[in-house]
Image (cartoon, rainbow, N blue to C red):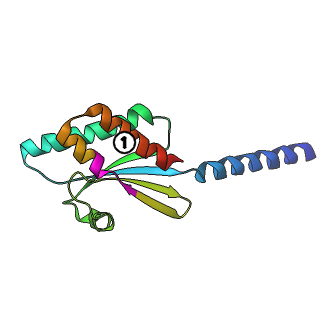
Amino acid sequence: MKKSIFMLVVAMITIIGATHAQSSKNEIEILYFKANLSCCKARACNALEADVRSVIEKYFADKNISFKVVKLADEANKALIEKYNAKSQTVVIVKKKKKKETATDVSAIVRDYAIKKDKEKFEKELKNKISECLK
């Protein structure tokens, strides 16, 4: 009887410890702000979104990173839009650690890529920024 109670207590402590360790990890969220655009511009915006998403999937599939598209026209997103002063194709990396939150705007990297179409440079710079936030 004592042995089974002891084993139950050890199991509970192990589960609590594992849960606490998971919740104390850094959480990264990448926000992609998107406007309602005409057909031609929407294709370009969707392509940029896909490229940002592909960098996350390619280099950070095993990390705790989420990708979220935030529509500028949606009233429910008004607080986020104001918080990050977002416009169409704004990309923000938000790092949450416990109750502290830091944001890194990487829109310049995305804008440069949209103009120059240098995918290798884009992937390298975005990967480096995300890696910095994971530290």
Q: Residue at x 60, y 53 (%)?
A: 24
SS of the residue at dot 1? helix
Q: Identify the magenta region.
A: 104-109
Q: Position of residue 45 (x, y in %)?
A: 18, 44
Q: Outermost residue, right direction?
A: 2
Residue 106 among those drawn in magenta:
yes
Q: Is residue 46 visible?
A: no
Q: Residue at x 17, y 42 (%)?
A: 115
Q: Residue at x 92, y 47 (%)?
A: 2
Q: From the viewer's perspective, is 45 left or right of 125?
A: left
Q: Residue at x 32, y 63 (%)?
A: 84
Q: From the viewer's perspective, is 78 left or right of 28?
A: left
Q: Position of residue 91 (x, y in %)?
A: 30, 51
Could you tell me the amino acid type at mark 1? Leu
In which quadrant will I find the N terminus? top right
- Please name whichever residue, 56 or 2, is drawn nearer the observer in this view of the structure: 56
Does residue 53 lie above or below 33 as drawn?
Answer: above
Does residue 74 lie above or below 107 as drawn?
Answer: below
Does residue 38 lie above or below 122 as drawn?
Answer: below
Residue 4 among those drawn in magenta:
no
- Give neighbour class at mark 1: few <14, some 14-19, many 20+ (Cα, 10 Å): some
Q: Is residue 68 visible?
A: yes
Q: Position of residue 43 (x, y in %)?
A: 14, 40
Quadrant hosting residue 70: bottom left
Count the labels in the image. 1
Residue occupied by mark 1: 126
Q: Position of residue 72 (x, y in %)?
A: 21, 59
